[in-house]
Image (spheres, rainbow, N blue to C red):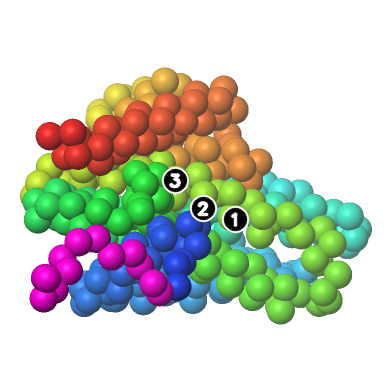
Amino acid sequence: MPIHDASYRGWQGDRVGRWSRFWTITVTGVRRSLRSPWLKRLMLAAFLPLLYFAIPFFLFEQSLRDPDHWRMLGVFLRAMPETSGLSQQISQLPAVPSDEEVETLRYDAWSYLLLTMLRYPQSFLMVLVVGIVAPPLISQDLRTRAYLIYFSRPLTRTEYIVGKFGVVAFFLLIISALPALILYVVGILLSPSVGVLHSTWDLPLRVLVGSAVLVVPTTLVALAISSLTLESRYAGFAWFAVWIIGHVTYSALTVIPSIEAQRLQQLYDPGWRQLASPYHVLGNAQSAIFELSRNGSATLPAFLYLAVVSGVALAILYRRVQAPMRA
């Protein structure tokens, strides 16, 4: 008679729901990522642009009551990119504007400020944050064969990928959507009444959609890169190389045509050249979401580009996650 029965014994404890399995991977990944002091510093730095962008919000609302503040607002707008359209609207505003003109200008100004914060400081921080969080997420599992532990449990490839996706998405939403939503609330508090909610209610939705356009493709690409190597440092190098090479290529393709267009006092349209830079593709898509795109012909190619890149990255992820189990 055996002293100890080493055969399979069924689990007698409580079972968690299927949809909560990926959540365990996400929570664990977030906790491990937060051990990095550099990541903590970047997360805090993500809220510093709020202090800067709150100033033009305040000046704009004050200018509607006291026209003397328009000059100070103009100083801030000149320091921001692509403000020609908004500056022209402000210059054409009559001395005693109607309520409809005020609401239209407010909507356009708020849209511009929210988009500018998402597209410039937050997008730059996105590259740094993803470069810290994403590279080790899958590459370390492949190097240490941790996938044997993952898939010895009732866990599917989809749940594994969603769990890893949630780690990166959590940090990206914190540095993109959350500061923009806080800035919107600041604008509401600075307004003369809560009635501005009626004319700007869709801006938070545009912020969320714009953040999703940023989060989904960048996260999938970063995870796909992580799955292609066993060394997280190589994945990090490849991630930063994608953005640096893309930006340099775009600059090389557009510098001469843009100078020529500026000499002729014409609006330069980069056209297909923007596809060389992921940063500019994302910026064009976000501008279209806020209805502030100056290059309407490139909007559809930008969204198609992001969809194709996301699909290819997802296919690579599924293949690489399954590959060790077939070996």
The amino acid type, in three-letter code, at marker 1 is Val
Mark 2 neighbour density, 10 Å: few (under 14) some (14–19) many (20 or more) = many
Q: Which image quadrant: the N terminus?
A: bottom left
Q: Could you tell me what secondary structure mostly forms the magenta stretch?
A: loop
| Label at residue 216 | 3
Label pair 3/2, CB-CB below 8 angstroms? no
Residue 10: within the magenta?
yes
Looking at the image, the residue that sits furthest to the front is: 1
Q: Position of residue 79 (x, y in %)?
A: 46, 58
Between the C-alphas of marks 3 and 1, the distance is 14 Å
Label pair 1/2, CB-CB below 8 angstroms? yes
Residue 265 at least partly seen: no
The residue stretch that appears in magenta: 1-13
Q: Position of residue 70 (x, y in %)?
A: 67, 66
| Label at residue 207 | 1
Between the C-alphas of marks 3 and 2, the distance is 9 Å
The amino acid type, in three-letter code, at marker 3 is Val
- Secondary structure type for disc 1: helix
179 horizontally vs 95: left or right: left
Residue 110: within the magenta?
no
> What residue is pinned by disc 2?
211
The correct choice, above or below, for 96 with respect to 257 in the image is below
Q: Position of residue 53 (x, y in %)?
A: 53, 68
